[in-house]
Amino acid sequence: MVYSNSQIFLVELIGTFILVVFATGSIVYDVQTGGTLGIAFAAIAPFIALIIGIHFFGKISLANFNPAVTIAFYITGHISKDKIAYYFVAEIIGALLGSLFVMSFIGSDADLGANTPNLDFSLFLIFPVEVLASAVLMAVIFIVVYTKGLKGFGGIAIGGIVGLDIYFLAFISGASMNPARALAPALFSGVLENLWLYWTAPYVGTIIVAFLFRHKFQQKK
């Protein structure tokens, strides 16, 4: 079945909204409860959001919810050039609405859950770690799409790697892996100094992996 641009736009907006509410709202809520839930809660929340989003929207839009993932899918030919704008605009609007929801119904603590690198580490470590987190995520996405087509346990695999990246790498780079997820809370909280990192490193990671996987999808066609 071929889905229209408006359908793709709608599900990408909704999916990104859900992801941002879960990913950033969990951080805000954890701070409000005195940090008792910790990094595990911040890792599990987007895991659940992605399971939901991929299950309901994967067959319609490939469940990107992430501009860096969209660019990678364009490189491998999964998304045509004329659809990129629909994805990007939907993802940004969905993320902004997600942060507005968090601010209105959960709170504005922790800079609305904005990603923050640990500057106790060198940028020469922080940047590659964020690239690595994004690259590993994209590799898992491609493996799932290549082998299962986002069916079965695909949502668990993709959501799981996001959760693991956050659990093990957020203490260094913030583990955003997603420019839209990073942008929305940064804009509304006014904490913009780290945004350059999350609008560069995730793209580097996903683009590298896209070029590595591109020939596999071309062969499959």
Image (cartoon, helix red, strand yellow):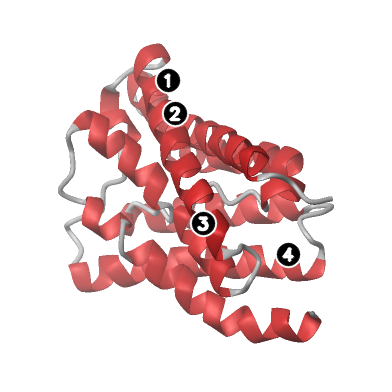
Q: Residue at x 70, y 70 (%)?
A: 143
In the image, residue 180 lies at what x, y percent? 40, 46
* Image point (51%, 43%), residue name: 43
Q: Amino acid at mark 2?
A: Gly
Q: Quadrant of residue 126?
A: bottom left
Asked if labels 1 and 3 touch by Cβ distance under 8 angstroms, the answer is: no
Kindly identify which residue carries mark 3: 84
Q: Nearer the viewer, residue 27 or 40?
A: 27
Q: Which residue is mark 2?
A: 98
Of the image marks 4 and 3, the number of the one nearer the N terminus = 3
- Which mark, residue 101? 1
Which residue is more in the foreground, 201 or 39? 201
Q: Mark 2: which secondary structure?
A: helix
| Residue at (46% x, 64% y) in the render | 134
Residue type, numbered disc 4: Val
Distance, label 1 to label 2, CA atoms, is 5 Å
Q: Amino acid at mark 3?
A: Ile
Image coordinates for residue 83, horizontal then vertical, percent:
56, 55
- Taking 160 as reference, is 99 left or right? left
